[in-house]
Amino acid sequence: MTAAEALRALRERWWIVVAATVLAAAAAYVYVKLPWVEPRWRSSVLIQATGRLDYGNFLALEKELRPLAEQVRQLAVMREVDRNLHTDLPPERMLDRTRAEPVQDSGQIRIDYEDADPLRAEQISLEIADVYTRQHNADEQGKLREERVILSTLDRPNQAILTWPLTRVVVPTAAALGLLAAAAVLLGMAYLDDSIRSAEDVGRFIELPLLGIVPRYRVSARGVASSAAAAPTEQSVSQPEVPVSP
């Protein structure tokens, strides 16, 4: 199939492509508005890790950031958060919704917490940071001063943002997928279609020279047969009347 034939196949049935695109976008919009689709709100809090301000200690601190971030995700931390806020959420569920990652070249740890309630997400993320900071700093008191790594929660906005479902992302993506799927189906049908409809099809399928074309006649309501192949011009000859059976 050539590019011209593909474009012709899409142009002849363009309405199918448009209908599939609109239906896919509408289905995606309805899906994101369904009541049982649970939204996810993410709240982020930054923890600053500080030690002695020399270059060697800073490099050591950078290496400790990932283990420190892993220690945030502990059931003991989640249980204390639940006791402080009375969330009535299982600690295992809170742990599953918590993410902690080091921020490279900054000496910081970012804590992300996701929840269906944006206000609760903000409260829990901040409480997780505070609980872990207190526990870690208490454990560091037994070390030498030059070996201590002190954590502090940064006073930054932790307003929750919606991460799912994002209508502005889901709907256009579904529309694009619907368009591509409809175009692929039409091209596949055109590729598998071996019917002869034009002079070009005769040359492609039969590989024989074309000697002539039999015009297609249709009978109008007034009983006059006209050729569909001939274009109406001023010099055209009128066709004789054809009797039509009642």
Image (cartoon, grey):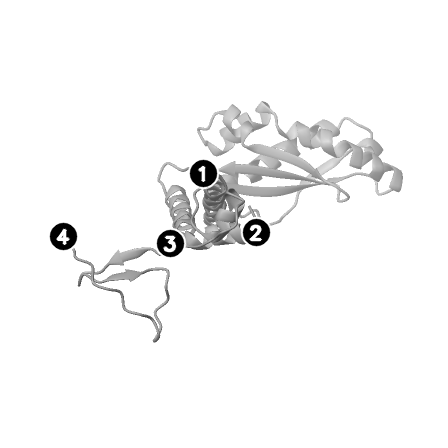
Residue 107, how many percent across, how many down? Answer: 75, 41
Q: Which residue is mark 1?
A: 116
Residue 142, how many percent across, how many down? Answer: 76, 26
Quadrant of the rendering where the N terminus is positioned: top right
Which callout, 3 or 1, points at the residue further toward the start of the chain?
1
Front disc: 1 or 4: 4
Residue 136, how many percent across, how many down? Answer: 69, 30
Front disc: 2 or 3: 3
Q: In whole angstroms, how far apart are the C-alphas of marks 4 and 3?
A: 24 Å
Q: Which residue is mark 3?
A: 214
Q: Which residue is mark 4?
A: 245
Residue nearer the viewer, 179 or 110: 179
Residue type, numbered disc 4? Ser
Farthest bottom residue in view: 234
Q: In whole angstroms, how far apart are the C-alphas of marks 2 and 3?
A: 29 Å
Q: Secondary structure at mark 1?
A: loop
Residue type, numbered disc 1? Ala
Which callout, 1 or 2, points at the residue further toward the start of the chain?
2
Residue nearer the viewer, 191 or 82: 191
Q: Secondary structure at mark 2?
A: helix
Q: Are marks 1 and 2 in contact (CB under 8 Å)?
A: no
Q: Are marks 3 and 1 in contact (CB under 8 Å)?
A: no
Q: Quadrant of residue 218?
A: bottom left
Q: Which mark is residue 3?
A: 2
Residue 83, how many percent across, how many down? Answer: 50, 28
Residue nearer the viewer, 90 or 233: 233
Q: Residues within 10 Å of mark 1 (few under 14, many from 20)?
A: some
Q: Secondary structure at mark 3?
A: loop
Q: Secondary structure at mark 4?
A: loop
Q: Residues within 10 Å of mark 4 (few under 14, many from 20)?
A: few
Residue type, numbered disc 3? Val
| Image side of residue 241 versus residue 231, left or right | left
